[in-house]
Amino acid sequence: MATAILVALLTATKGTFCKMSENEATAALGRLQIRSSRRRNHDAKKRKGLECWRQPVREVAGGLVRIVRNGRFGQFRLAPTPLEICPGRALCEKHANSEYLIFVDESFYNFFGFADVEGNFCHAALGLPKQNYAALQEAIRPSLEAYTSRVGALTGEPPRELKSVSLARLPLDFRIGFTRELVSALIATGGFVAGFYSTTRGIVMERVRTNLLDEIDRVPEEHAALYDAARTELLTEFKGVGQSRLIKQLLLHPFSALSNLLASFDCTFRVRYDPRGQREDQEVRAAMGHYMQGLARVPELFGDDNPFLGMDIHIASHEDVGLQLVDIVAGEVRGFFRLNQEALSENATLTLITGDSDEPLQYFLQFNQSIHNVGALSPMSSPPAAKLALENSENLISYYYPVLAAGIVSCVSDTGQPRLLEISTGLILDQQE
């Protein structure tokens, strides 16, 4: 729950915790400067981390800003959020006050049961204004027909639907062309994509960290027993019809982020999810509805209105182009993380990130007249940043950057930290426990 709320906060664009007047920002920074004078730390490792950080500061009253603390000098300043400078923001602004249709798909490998540490789980979303869905289908139709022809020639029979595993078998130049056509169609129709990924180890380690809160400030180097205990807890906790409890828990992450993103532009949305089984679908639908209603009961964070219009889980993917397209996105997100393990390990630490911890770079938000530590920022090294932001044939997810929601890909690090890869800022945000 905490992870989902943090992601929602980070993608928001309005509310007292994101937009501040110049006077309010100055007052907030003043209060933080007083606090920081009591917490200065000149540790050599922190100084080294700061030398790599180059985040432009924009003190714009009422802008999309966040408060960043330099741990070396105990100084605070305002800096842009990823959403402020990502290329996809203009699309959301153009289609403000619209009803969006969001397609959600999952991809997993040896994940359920938490036995294989290399198992993984991926969620992807593809959204666009509902009124533009027909236009998207028409725009992508030639590419779908070409895909059907190519796969039919390869396998001897036409495919039932567009699938990531089948597309991956086709020549690279065809896959690149297909991806470009899809991104162009999304830009033309006001669409976006989003992705979340975690390994089995990441999910279990997240529970290990949670279990140690209020006890110690760092996961021990030798933590095999803690890992086994956390895995046993998860196995006991997430039982039920077709793993529906685990699926709905994992859905909280993309749901809360997308909800707040769209609410920021005064948009409502309906989710369409590929059906699995009647009883399981009912469990997931009911849980998501209850969760979204709960967010609406916290107006200081999420506003007074609930943008969530409901979830459809009755249309099979072979009958819905949107569900087929989001399957392609999920495949590319999962492919990126499997190919680039450094995205899960870079700057990851066993040290817990709490309200009292003191990292080299910290991200603060103000809401309800209080300042809250959201997490630790660190520079993303050039290789993963380039693989996400610059078009390259090894990582087709890079072609989606112009329509990537808030310019962010989210994941859980190898050490169990919920993290955001902020492509537009070149930073990694590891969230507070």
Image: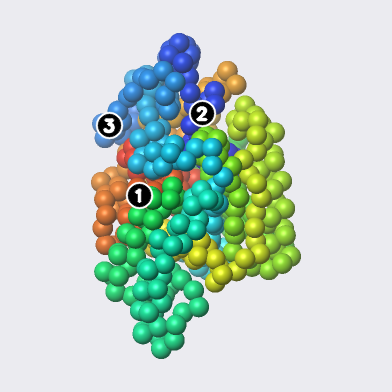
Mark 3 or 2: the one toward you = 2
Q: Quadrant of the N terminus?
A: top right
Q: Position of residue 353 (x, y in %)?
A: 49, 36
Residue picked out by circle 3: 54
Q: Earlier in the sequence, mark 3 or mark 1?
A: 3
Judge whether residue 273 can be spotted in this image. yes
Q: Nearer the viewer, residue 171 or 142?
A: 142
Determine the residue positioned at 60% across, 21% down.
Answer: 368
Q: Judge whether residue 357 can be spotted in this image.
A: no
Residue at 61% of width from left, 30% of height from top? 303
Left or right of residue 388, residue 195 in this image? right
Disc 2: which residue: 14
Q: CA distance from mark 3 to mark 2?
A: 25 Å
> Is 421 positioned to the left or the right of 203 in the image?
left
Mark 1 is surrounded, within 10 Å at the Cα level, by few (under 14), some (14 to 19) or many (20 or more) other residues, namely: many
- Identify the amino acid type marked 2: Lys
Spot occupied by residue 199 in the image (x, y as percentages of width and height): 48, 58
The residue where tag 1 is placed is 401
Q: Earlier in the sequence, mark 3 or mark 2?
A: 2
Mark 1: which amino acid?
Tyr
* Quarter of the image that includes the C terminus: top right
Q: Residue 137's spot in the image, x, y percent?
A: 46, 62
In terms of secondary structure, where does tag 1 sit?
helix
